[in-house]
Image (cartoon, helix red, strand yellow):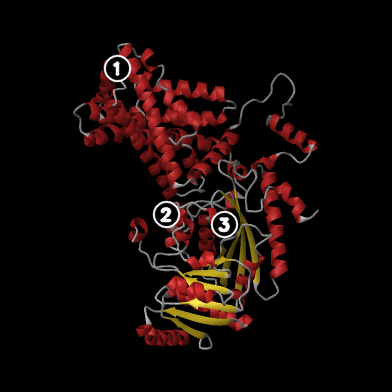
Amino acid sequence: MSNLDRHDETGVGDHGQLDSDRAEPDSAGESDTVRDAVDRSRSGAPAAGSVVRDRFSSDEVFQRIVAAADEEVTSGNRELFFSGIAAGFAITITFLMYASLYGSTDGHPILSALLYPLGFIYIIIGGYQLYTENTLPPVALTLERLASVPALLRHWTIVVTGNFVGAIIGAAVLAWGGVFSPEAAAAGLHLGEHGFETPWWDLFFKACFAGLIVAGVVWVEYAARDTIARLVVVYLAFLAIPIGNLFHVVTSFTEMSYAVFAGDHSFFVGLTQFVLPVLLGNTIGGVLLVTVVNYYQTSEERLESARFAGTDRRLSVREWTLGSLAGRSYVPLIDTAETTAADDDTYRVIVPIANPRTESELVEVAETLASVHESAVVHLVHIVQTPDRASVGGTGGQRARIVDESETLLADMCESVGDSDVEWETSTIVTHRSFEEIFDTAERQHADLVVLGWEDDKLWGAARAERPIGELTNQLPCDLLVFKNRGLDTSRILLPTAGGPDSDLSAEVAQTLSATVDADVTLLHVVGGPDERAAGERFLGEWAADHNLQDATLAVDDSGDIEDAICRAADEHTIVFLGATERGLLSRLVTGSLHFDVVNETDCSVLLTERPGERTLFERLFGR
């Protein structure tokens, strides 16, 4: 069977997509075997008869939670924040119903609470991001050292901020929009003032029990097999919060905000004396009393079944503690690469591949650049990106087939282009992300160079501008080449330069191609007018000598229009090298803010080059 025929069985798409619908068994016999294995209990009881297994084991519940946590912790900032806003605004419904019934029933402890769970039902069934619900799944991933503590804190911070923004909007509408009846308005103010009047430590311990209930709901919810069961669990569990006089942090924030808007209370006092102890109590109750306990009741096989070769892919203690500041912040679904020793003197080139069938020219570029080094390795990384909200990696057999097919395609690619003494390595990564996996791989492999293809149909060509883009691309792990392929022809190279480290990288690549494939190199320098031509010619001559490009053709353009000058000169060349500006390259490619006309309007290929900058931690956190 050919590779193209096998493609439809493995679920590895042409653009690195994982088709989650390919998880069905390959045959009726395999289907029966799988069904028998699922329906037979561990004690050996048969599937047929009076007792049939109808619930998940604790290990299986844990697998489902890890799958959900993987989707949550790899979501972008924007997705998390706006989902958090939706959840916070939905909690307004809980407050609206609670206050309305409280006012109409004169504060009856049972009747007033009957519609309290409505907002939580919307949130959990709708899949919105609620802070207390998120105490379980991301923590489970962090306990397995598959996500770092900073990644967990980032997730929590974005979600709780979104929840509070949504809640404060809803509270403002209720306070000033005339939604409440006079009785409901008085009841809402009473509910908010009740939190102000409750002692700090009473709030904390009441919130611990509420956190226990909410995190327990999440665990039981993932054990449920149908929507009706989930609705019943959610309703009964959240009904216990008002009946037990407990406190939920997002509801409490809504009540506090309403009391501030409708009364004369201080927002700062409400945050520190009301919301803060509830936030801490919910977190500790959810994490310690439920998450950790449920985590340790699962078997030692939980990680192996939840991740492909998971135990060998955990974060190091340093990565787990410091996250991306120390290396990785997250372990992808599947990563077949081994970490390279830091003291390895081998020149390492990483080539991320979205489709091994169509990117051989990109690999040829990498091979040529590596061949001039005495000891060099070209590492091909096939990044298979799963669709949004897909199951995590499918079954164990499906994951194995994805890796086998990927390694076969990569081996074929190496064989077709590898005719030099360069050593080849291959690996496969299956993940929800694209850019961050590229940079994480470069960090682990201690790469010297990443050669990246750029097309609209590539995974990274359609990437969103989120934290992995905006932050990581401002702290590159190594030299970066981005190849806009319009046919691989390096016979006539145009290299515009105004100096700088990124032009230095362009010069190194041009010098390598000149020495290996006898490429003709033209250096272009653009000046502001004819009176600057002489100075431009001196600069260009000195720059060529400094970069071992004395044989290059020197061209000075005095039009003052850099992009137009490059476009005109590009018509006579087969490839153009462009160095990044001080604002960087890759993040602006993704966001569409890189306006080099030559990239999109010329007929020849373009090679964009960028070198790592020296940005401090302060600059990384707060920008330039």
Q: Earlier in the sequence, mark 3 or mark 2?
A: 2
Identify the residue under disc 1: 181
Q: Earlier in the sequence, mark 1 or mark 2?
A: 1
For the residue marked with disc 2, what is the amino acid?
Answer: Leu
Q: Are marks 1 and 3 in contact (CB under 8 Å)?
A: no
For the residue marked with disc 3, what is the amino acid?
Answer: Asp
Q: CA distance from mark 1 to mark 2?
A: 51 Å
Q: Earlier in the sequence, mark 1 or mark 3?
A: 1
Residue 131 appears in view? no
Q: Nearer the viewer, residue 365 or 406?
A: 365
Q: CA distance from mark 3 to mark 2?
A: 34 Å
- 568 vs 173: above or below: below
Q: Classify mark 2: residues with Cα within 10 Å, few (<14), some (14-19) or many (20+).
A: some
Identify the residue under disc 3: 456
The percent coordinates of residue 345 (x first, y second) are 54, 74
The percent coordinates of residue 194 (x first, y second) are 26, 23
Identify the residue under disc 2: 322
Of badges 3 and 2, nearer the viewer stands: 3
Secondary structure beneath disc 3? loop
Q: Are marks 3 and 2 in contact (CB under 8 Å)?
A: no
